[in-house]
Amino acid sequence: MTKKTALITGITGQDGAYLARFLLKKNYKVIGLERRSARSFNWRLEKLNINDKVIIEDTDIKEINNLIRIFDKYKVDEVYNLAAQSFVYSSFQNPIETSLVNSIGTLNLLEIIRNKKNKIKFYQASTSEMFGESKSIKQDEKTLFHPRSPYATSKTFAHYSVQNYREAYNLHAVSGILFNHESPLRGEEFITRKITLGLSKIVLKKQKNLKIGNLYAKRDWGYADDYVEAMWKMLQSKKPDDYVIATGKNHSIKQFINESIKALKLKTKWVGKGLNEKLINTENNKAIIVIDKKFFRPTEVNILKGNYQKAKRELKWKPKTNFSKLVKMMIASDLEYVKNLDKN
Ligand code: NAP
């Protein structure tokens, strides 16, 4: 059988790296798009030992001419569009760039695929943030969207564009509505990694305290490596469709901190309320977590919890890694990382 070729936009990101490894194991030829930068190596691909196993092409997904050149160069079977300005907090500061990448970047790819004669399958990285201020206790494929950030509005545009290209042009295009998923490869600016890295630094005496925003936002957190399998399964399905990928359980940021504290075996207690709430290390009475208003979003998404039953039923997919295991894995990895910081 001839090797399939997959094109991954955002291969240098968390999901891109795990997906590349997954597809290489399935014997795909993997081409990854990377924005031009002075960086000489991709730490995530290095960490997974696959840097020399993928073909990297430089391009920004906003540049349609460069994208066309890449589609002309390779006979691509499957496209996974993971590239995004993916940090919700930054999207409030950079709404236009966020939309150009997340919305127009997606449209660029859809337009190229529409104009190609061979049938290229397309996966879009949609997000639970599109549900935003949802009235439903659990969100599924039929739940109304109520996006609450420029990130979420830009992704909603892309999501509906995929649906429209599927209906209008019969494209084999799908969207995975993925709830938050984390891993040791998560970017340091994201709340879960900020917590596991910050607390690891505090334990190893490299940092005094950690400043956090809203402790009470609840998210449905899964493991990124479990979720990339769902992306692939969606594209193998005969009928293109959209699927929610989640664990069906949610936890608050405060619970994520408590689970991290448990993994680190620290003795602590929460004191105070509102902006004065703090986590105290009871061994030395020092505050290790404090609240900083700066990190609150202008419009927050308070609770998200996904219903992944359709994916379970039709794709035979279910999450393998629970919350406690995920936090332990991230803490273990960050303790190692911080210990090695001095050596490098
Ligand atoms: P990530 O780690 O932030 O990776 C984003 C990737 O996009 C990086 O490789 C980044 O490149 C690339 N990128 C950004 N702007 C670009 C541009 N203009 N042109 C080309 N590449 C560009 O995100 P992730 O966690 O892997 O998430 C993957 C996708 O799933 C994203 O679309 C995200 O919005 C979506 N999603 C994620 C979650 C989650 O919880 N992780 C949940 C739902 C949906 P650089 O390395 O140069 O920055």
Image: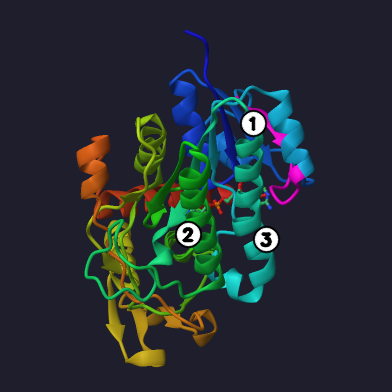
Q: Is residue 171 left or right of residue 136?
A: right
Q: Nearer the viewer, mark 2 or mark 1?
A: 1
| Residue bearing mark 1 | 116
Which picture quadrant has residue 94?
A: bottom right
**99 versus 343 height, above or below:** below
Residue closest to the eye, 336 or 219: 219
Q: Residue furthest top?
A: 1
Quarter of the figure with the C terminus: top right
Whichever of callouts 3 and 2 sits on the residue coming sooner in the sequence is 3
Mark 2 or mark 1: which comes first in sequence?
Answer: 1
Residue depicted at x 56% and y 41%: 44
C-alpha distance separating marks 3 and 2 = 31 Å
Q: Look at the image and tell me whether residue 266 can be seen.
A: no
Is the CB atom of the residue marked by disc 3 within 8 angstroms of ligand 1's nearest atom?
yes
Residue 136: percent from the left, percent from the top? 24, 71
Query: Where in the figure is residue 133, as x and y percent of width and height?
Result: 36, 76
Residue hosting label 3: 100
Q: Which residue is mark 2?
A: 197
Within-10-Å neighbours for mark 2: few <14, some 14–19, many 20+: many
Question: Which region is colored magenta?
Answer: 54-64
**Amino acid marked by disc 1:** Lys
Q: Is mark 1 within 8 Å of ligand 1?
A: no
Query: Few, some or many C-alpha atoms within 10 Å of disc 1 (few <14, some 14-19, many ≥20)?
Result: few
186 relative to 252, above or below: above
Q: Quick check: 179 above or below 46?
A: below
Q: Depth check: 110 or 189 in front?
A: 110
